[in-house]
Amino acid sequence: MRVLHWYPNLQTGGAVANTVAALANAEADLGIEVAIASAKSGDQALYGPVSVSERVRLLTWQPSWTLKKMTWAFHGISGRTITEFRELNPTVIHVHAEFNIDNLQVPRIFDCPILLSPHGAFDPIGLQKGLRWAKRFYLTLADRILYKKISLFHALSPSEQKNILALVPDSYIYCVPNGTLFDESRRPNGSEIGNSKKYETLNLVFVGRLDTYTKGLDILIQAFAGASKELGDRAIRLTLVGPDWNGSVLKLSRLAADLGVTDKVTFTGAIPQTSVADVIERADIYIQLSRHDAFPAGVAQALVAGIPTIASSHVGTTSYAEVAALPYLRVVSNDVEDAKNAIVDFAGRIHVLRELADRHHSAAVEFFSWRRIARMHIREYQSLGKTAL
């Protein structure tokens, strides 16, 4: 079996790029031939360089031309490059992330089954923001050119499965999560600290791009300020880790100042990808109050590390029954009061929550294992391809 992952924006980095690489690496570890197709880019990679295994073939092409509008890009592909792609003779093509105009070229280049992972692009809240007219136009084109050629859609969560069906009725969909972005063999620090930690200062952490609206960071700052007031003398801090997005840091800093918690909120900016796991594992509570988020890596990493976690119901990860059942996870609405109450509750039960996390995090380790996830994808590839392992 020969699998080609199609993600032309791989070299620009970001969450999707890292998950595509992680999936490809895990599939290659299981012994199948794997390649990733990506356009060359001179831009600095968001979150740092993408780590692709030596066992994964990287097919990069120099665009013959490029059209860009904000975060949208359309890359020209030369006839020579198309010939090289076809010579790979893939069994299946796994296309990643929608509202990517380059995806429309896949059906004309390849004659094999195509799978599509939208990576949250079909979320109804997300569809209503940004260039709405462009998204509507793209969906009209994609329905004619691409979606009718898709053999299988991949949903990252049960909630995304519903979103796909709403836009592409009668489509065939399989549901498989993403894993974490870090070494699964790391021993969570919850089992090392346990009840020996005094929690003199309660450290809350969020990791991701600092996109105020999408990540619900205004809700987070307000909930944190309310919890800080209610907890009184209890020392509590909030650290937001990630690159600024459209001036969000300035807006959030002003909000923190207005609420009187400037001295309790820290913005680290972007940090090396290799340091993110350490930051999450040192947290007392991980919190993610996104208004829409298909599968944030920070939530998965925190659960695997045994960190008590608060997440909004709009985080796709929480729509898995296996995840929602974890006793050290609390799912909240996007309401400031609900989130504030969750923080106060966790602050009062932090020792109990860490004990629960230590006993139950092994279920999260297995659920978010890239090896398990890769096997599930490979079974779907095999159901479409003519070649079995």
Image (spheres, rainbow, N blue to C red):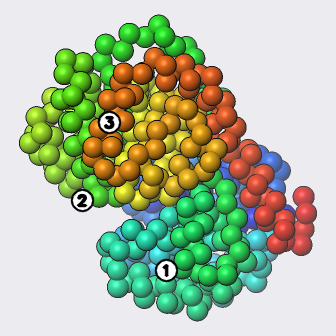
| Residue 378 locus on image (x, y percent) | 79, 58
Give the CA separation, mark 3 to mark 2: 30 Å
Residue 219 in view (yes/no): yes
Residue situated in front as seen by the camera: 385 or 344: 344
Looking at this rendering, what residue extends furthest in the top direction?
196
Query: In the visual, does 349 lie left or right of 52?
Result: left
Quarter containing the N terminus: bottom right
Give the CA separation, mark 3 to mark 1: 43 Å
User: Residue under circle 2?
Assistant: 246
User: Residue under circle 3?
Assistant: 341
Quarter containing the C terminus: bottom right
| Residue 217 locus on image (x, y percent) | 28, 48
Q: Nearer the viewer, mark 3 or mark 1?
A: 3
Look at label 2 and name its amino acid. Answer: Asn
Query: What label sits on residue 101 in the rendered view?
Result: 1
Q: Alpha-carbon neighbours of circle 3 within 10 Å: few (<14), some, or many (≥20)?
A: some
Q: Alpha-carbon neighbours of circle 2 within 10 Å: few (<14), some, or many (≥20)?
A: few
Look at label 1 and name its amino acid. Answer: Ile
Q: Alpha-carbon neighbours of circle 1 within 10 Å: few (<14), some, or many (≥20)?
A: some
**Residue at 84% across, 68% down:** 383
| Residue 327 locus on image (x, y percent) | 55, 32
Is residue 306 positioned above or below 65 on the image? above
Q: Are dots 2 and 1 in contact, CB under 8 Å?
A: no
Residue situated in front as seen by the camera: 166 or 85: 166
| Residue 353 locus on image (x, y percent) | 49, 24
